[in-house]
């Protein structure tokens, strides 16, 4: 009997913060279930619940004029910058990076665009890093982004479907592959 009371007491102590935060959310009366983990983890650190992941953002040449604002936005959304590197793509590096686009009619203009100036490579960390960053940057086409997601990075700073300011990995596997490749650039 005493052992079961001890177990019950430990469970109450462990789960109390979750229950309390679920019942008393910050900033709103109703909290979407997908935001609950983020809300809890912003208040207390629970290693099993608050696991972070990494993703990659690349500020493209047209976005470099707005890099300070973009980085401020990322930090305000809870991203931690793990690695930060400014470099310039060579045509050969673009061909490796966009190997699936080499045969496309727009590929020569893509190479010209990506090699015309510096880029900034950011390895970012937070809870649900990939989907959060994808949501934050908005659709590939800045015109669409302005209509549907007017506060997204591409809506604010992108020019057209090619010059859309920023790249973000579309999955954790892509992020790992892209981070490996871009870390090797000099």
Image: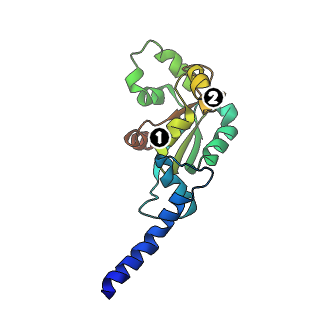
**Quarter of the view holding residue 115:** top right
Q: Residue at x 47, y 47 (%)?
A: 34
Q: Residue at x 56, y 37 (%)?
A: 136
At which x and y percent is residue 112? 55, 20
Name, please, the residue furthest toward the top.
105
Check contact, mark 2 vs mark 1: CB within 8 A: no
Mark seen at residue 58: none
Q: Nearer the viewer, mark 2 or mark 1?
A: 2
Count of all numbered marks drawn on residues in the image: 2
Image: 109 above or below 128: above
Image: 167 above or below 160: below
Residue 128 visible in the snapshot = no
Crowding at mark 1 (Cα within 10 Å: few <14, some 14-19, many 20+): some
At which x and y percent is residue 144? 56, 21
**Mark 2 = which residue?**
150
**Mark 1 = which residue?**
131
At which x and y percent is residue 36? 49, 52
Residue 158 visible in the snapshot = yes
Crowding at mark 2 (Cα within 10 Å: few <14, some 14-19, many 20+): some
């Amino acid at each position: 009997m005493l052992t079961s009371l001890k177990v019950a007491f430990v469970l109450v102590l462990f789960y109390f913060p979750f229950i309390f935060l679920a019942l008393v959310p910050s900033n709103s009366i109703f909290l979407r279930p997908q935001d609950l983990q983020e809300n809890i983890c912003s208040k207390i650190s629970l290693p099993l619940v608050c696991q972070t992941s990494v993703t990659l953002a690349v500020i493209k040449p047209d976005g470099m004029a707005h890099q300070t604002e973009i980085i401020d936005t990322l930090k305000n959304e809870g991203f931690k910058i793990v690695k930060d590197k400014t470099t310039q793509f060579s045509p050969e590096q673009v061909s490796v990076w966009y190997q699936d686009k080499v045969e496309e009619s727009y590929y020569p203009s893509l190479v010209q665009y990506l090699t015309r100036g510096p880029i900034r490579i950011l390895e970012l960390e937070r809870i649900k890093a990939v989907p959060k960053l994808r949501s934050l940057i908005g659709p590939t086409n800045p015109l669409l982004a302005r209509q549907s997601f007017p506060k997204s990075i591409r809506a604010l700073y992108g020019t057209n479907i090619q010059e859309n300011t920023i790249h973000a990995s579309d999955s954790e596997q892509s992020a790992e592959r892209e981070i490996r490749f871009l870390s090797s650039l000099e």
